[in-house]
């Protein structure tokens, strides 16, 4: 299949919230082709009127690498249609089989691109916030190879941003919990992100330049899940509580189904 056809297939799967079979079980897709498919599929969203709002990083913590069995840092593109209001509600019918993970978000005040140091990256940050990412692989059973998940925009489906904080606090090792209906599902720390979340932003700047899309002022960068992701079911209220930075949450609306275990 050609890249355009695969981009349409993944875009349709995301748009209609229906899963699609894996297509590269033979492992013939290169990373370059995978990113080309991602770009084409996001281009379709932009053509429909969605606005680009930033990038998301993936597999920046060991917890996520272990959970998904993949170990290369990947990235995806965020659009405004993925934003979910903090404390708000989103319909479960928008997703195939959503999972949620706690992240830290950066918002930039200036362009950031290429090989930069941690202090240079920090100087481009306007504010930092606790965040949740909703990942919703378009592949059956949430299973994929590395090129397949890249083509599928790194499973990105939604994001919730908590209060923006000044970036001059030490955010290298902030304790956090992922809570489902008030119960702690996972605990972790921002240090899980490559040892310091700023390293994820440094990697984002390098990868963005390689893609010819420098990180822009006003863009959000999601640094990656700090813990394993958790399934979310209709009726659930999911939240992240982060030391010093605050919390963020949302409600998955819809008729509650019987819980399925992992
Ligand atoms: C891929 C996306 C990984 C993260 O934060 O590590 C990711 C997946 O797990 O489906 O978003
Ligand atoms: Mg993530």
Image: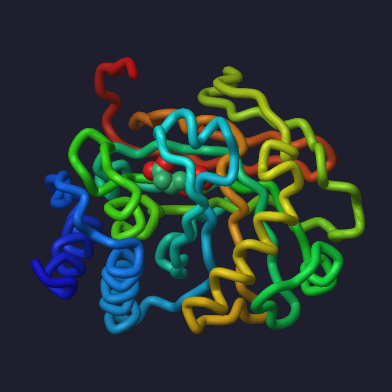
> Looking at the figure, which quarter contains the C terminus?
top left
> Looking at the figure, which quarter contains the N terminus?
bottom left
Nearer the observer, 29 or 10: 29
Picture layout, residue 58 above or below residue 125: above
Image coordinates of residue 120 in percent, x first then y, are: 82, 71
Q: Residue at x 35, y 29 (%)?
A: 233
Dividing the picture into quarters, in which one does residue 248 lie? top right
Total marks in image: 0
Dividing the picture into quarters, in which one does residue 122 lie? bottom right
Image coordinates of residue 240 in percent, x first then y, are: 63, 36
Q: Residue at x 27, y 42 (%)?
A: 144
Q: Would residue 125 be seen by someone viewing this image from the given angle?
A: no
Nearer the observer, 90 or 224: 224
Image coordinates of residue 215 in percent, x first then y, are: 61, 77
Picture layout, residue 16 above or below residue 89: below
In the image, 181: left or right of 248? left
């Amino acid at each position: 299949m050609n890249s355009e056809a695969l981009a349409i297939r993944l875009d349709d799967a995301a748009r209609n919230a229906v899963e699609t079979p894996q297509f590269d079980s033979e492992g013939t897709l290169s990373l370059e082709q995978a990113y080309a498919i991602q770009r084409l599929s996001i281009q379709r969203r932009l053509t429909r009127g969605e606005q680009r709002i930033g990038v998301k990083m993936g597999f920046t913590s060991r917890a996520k690498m272990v959970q998904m069995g993949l170990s290369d840092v990947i990235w995806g593109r965020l659009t405004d249609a993925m934003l979910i209001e903090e404390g708000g509600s989103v319909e479960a019918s928008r997703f195939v089989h959503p999972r949620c993970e706690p992240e830290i978000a950066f918002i930039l005040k200036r362009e950031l691109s290429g090989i930069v140091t941690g202090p240079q990256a920090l100087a481009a940050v306007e504010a930092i916030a606790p965040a949740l990412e909703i990942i919703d692989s378009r592949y059956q059973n949430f299973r994929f190879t590395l090129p397949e998940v890249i083509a599928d925009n790194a499973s990105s489906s939604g994001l919730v941003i908590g209060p923006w904080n000044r970036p001059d606090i030490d955010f290298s090792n902030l304790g956090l919990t992922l809570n489902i209906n008030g119960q702690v599902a996972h605990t972790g720390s921002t240090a899980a992100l490559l040892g310091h979340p700023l390293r994820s932003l440094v990697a984002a700047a390098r990868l963005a330049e390689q893609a010819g899309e420098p990180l822009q002022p006003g863009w959000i960068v999601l640094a990656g899940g700090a813990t394993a992701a958790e399934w979310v079911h209709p009726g659930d209220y999911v939240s992240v509580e982060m030391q010093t930075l605050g919390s963020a949450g949302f409600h998955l609306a819809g008729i509650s189904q019987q819980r399925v275990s992992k």
